[in-house]
Image (spheres, grey):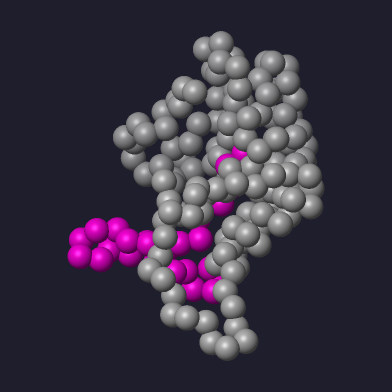
Amino acid sequence: MLRVAEDLPYADKEDPRNWLDIAALVRQIRAWDLDVVDFQLFRGFRARDPAYLRSIKALCQQCGLPIGFLGVGRGFVGVEQIDGRPEGVALPQADRRQRIAEVKEGIDLAAFMGAPLVRLFGGGRPPPPPPPRRGGGGHWGGREGGGDARGQGGVGGGPPPGGL
């Protein structure tokens, strides 16, 4: 696999003004004679409406490029500076709910685009939470969001329990 511009140092990769246009990217991948295209769903796409997504899917087909996966999610972990190092921290419940909703939307859009695989970006591991109170219980956002993929014939996966 050739990862194009994955780790190039460029200013503020979270800023949409720095993203490549998806149609131009697809054409460039075809010009390089690569054989598959992978997308991070909410980066570079000008819209989420069906007509636009259908046009990107059609462009991929015209170029003979199957969609390998659509990456969704911004992770279920926040980041704080602890002792000068970025550390994963648990998100507040409202933020976690919002990110789960984004994953569910991404799964629906991936199914619409015909992507055979959804890559869920979960983030780092926060410190272990306190034990749940009796009658309570925790859940992992990826498990909840991934349920949608299974309902649409998808298959989920992630890193092993011990991490990578």
User: Which residue shows up at 55% across the image and 48% down it?
Assistant: 158
87 magenta-colored: yes
9 above or below 23?
below
Q: Nearer the viewer, residue 127 or 112?
A: 127
Q: Nearer the viewer, residue 156 or 66?
A: 156
Would residue 79 be visible to someone looking at this image? yes
Q: Nearer the viewer, residue 148 or 53?
A: 148
Residue 134 in picture, x, y percent from top left: 57, 88
Relative side of 88 to 102, left or right: left
124 magenta-colored: no
Total numbered labels placed on residues in the image: 0
Residue 60 in picture, x, y percent from top left: 68, 23
Residue 86 in picture, x, y percent from top left: 29, 58
User: Which residue shows up at 66% across the image and 62% down it?
Assistant: 144
The quarter of the displayed image where residue 30 is located: top right
| Range covered by the magenta-colored residues | 70-95
User: Which residue shows up at 57% across the image and 64% down it?
Assistant: 140
The quarter of the displayed image where residue 146 is located: bottom right
Relative side of 30 to 131, left or right: right
User: Which residue shows up at 42% across the image and 60% down it?
Assistant: 125
Relative side of 14 to 58, left or right: left
